Image: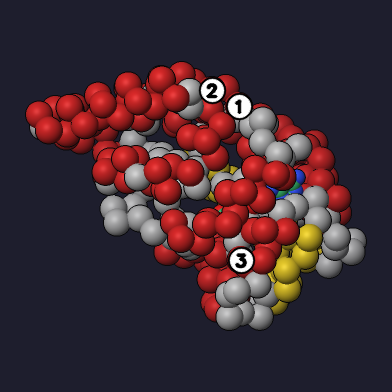
């Protein structure tokens, strides 16, 4: 788990909506796998500013978003949507037993006590799927960010659960594992999470964007940040950046783990 506290998101959350939106490619997979067009009752666990719940609610189903940060939820309430927003901990979901037909955890598992959350999600689902969208340590170690911010990338990779760890905790909570789907970061991303700049390295020069990436805020020392940005600038100016990193473009960057009750 990352060393992050609710106060972090109560600070970050104030400008979160400016750089973080629902990424259409992620929404598409979640909507199809959850079959939201058939209706049902769904939960976005650690929903943050509510981008994914709000986008999915437009596709179908009755949605609730739960988050520990009031500042994030204040932004969530700004969406024109049918979603209900609830302040609460993912480890103690404010949801009755067997109430849900599906649930998602997007870019948040690394903040949570995964085992407790999976048990809670299992309790709250009647039948249906839990989908986790997350970076995984082996994928993170292929990110080109590692050339520029090696200590940060190492800290991120060490803080994440592997696919096998996620599977074993899901199984322990009672879930069946259906599959893992790989995800490639989009060109022209709109949800500016940590590796969304894979094809848009210029975003890392913008402090406002970095500030809404918890990893840059929490895990990148100022000296590494300066040195990394200088090297990135030099590589971009010389053209070495694209020569070096383009061949890696077909390596997946994130994954969806899909489990079923
Ligand atoms: C990186 S944000 C992701 C938000 C959202 N899922 C998205 O992708 O836009 C992580 C969120 O996890 C929330 N969070 C952290 N620990 C939590 C906990 N124990 N229970 C509920 N939410 C938590 C934070 O407040 C923050 O909103």
Mark 3 vs mark 1: give the one in front: 3
Reply above or below: 14 against 77: above
| Residue 224 percent coordinates (x, y) | 40, 21
Of pointers 3 and 1, the one earlier in the residue sequence: 3
Determine which residue is flagged by label 1.
159
Determine which residue is flagged by label 3.
75
Number of other residues with Cα within 10 Å of mark 3, as a class: few under 14, some 14 to 19, many 20 or more: some
Determine which residue is flagged by label 2.
155
Does mark 3 have its CB less than 8 Å from ligand 1?
Answer: no
- Kindly identify the residue that appears in the image at 47 percent across and 57 percent down: 20
| Residue farthest toward the left in the current orientation of the protein | 238
| Residue 178 percent coordinates (x, y) | 62, 48
Name the quadrant of the N terminus: top right
Query: Circle 1 sits in a helix, a strand or a loop, which is it?
Result: helix
Q: Find out whether the residues at labels 3 and 1 contact each other: C-beta distance under 8 Å.
A: no
Residue 41 located left or right of residue 27? right
Q: CA distance from mark 2 to mark 1?
A: 6 Å
Query: Circle 3 sits in a helix, a strand or a loop, which is it?
Result: helix
């Amino acid at each position: 788990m990352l060393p992050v506290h609710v106060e972090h998101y109560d600070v970050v959350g104030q400008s979160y909506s400016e750089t973080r939106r629902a990424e259409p490619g992620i929404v598409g997979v979640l909507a199809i796998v959850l079959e939201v067009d058939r209706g049902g009752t769904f939960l976005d666990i650690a929903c943050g500013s509510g981008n994914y719940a709000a986008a999915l609610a437009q596709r179908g189903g009755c949605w609730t978003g739960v988050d520990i940060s009031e500042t994030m939820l204040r932004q969530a309430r700004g969406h024109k949507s049918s979603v209900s927003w609830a302040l609460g901990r993912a480890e103690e979901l404010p949801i009755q037993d067997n109430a849900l037909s599906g649930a998602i955890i997007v870019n948040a598992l690394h903040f949570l006590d995964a085992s407790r959350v999976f048990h809670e999600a299992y309790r709250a689902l009647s039948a249906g799927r839990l989908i986790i969208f997350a970076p995984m340590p082996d994928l993170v170690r292929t990110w080109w960010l590692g050339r520029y911010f090696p200590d940060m990338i190492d800290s991120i990779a060490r803080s994440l659960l592997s696919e096998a760890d996620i599977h074993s905790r899901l199984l322990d909570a009672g879930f069946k594992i259906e599959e893992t789907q790989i995800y490639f970061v989009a060109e022209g991303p709109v949800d500016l999470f940590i590796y969304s700049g894979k094809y848009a390295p210029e975003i890392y020069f913008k402090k406002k964007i970095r500030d809404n990436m918890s990893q840059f805020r929490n895990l990148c020392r100022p000296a590494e940040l300066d040195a990394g940005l200088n090297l990135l600038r030099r590589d971009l100016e010389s053209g070495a950046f694209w020569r070096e990193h383009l061949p890696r473009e077909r390596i997946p960057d994130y994954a969806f783990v899909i489990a079923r009750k």
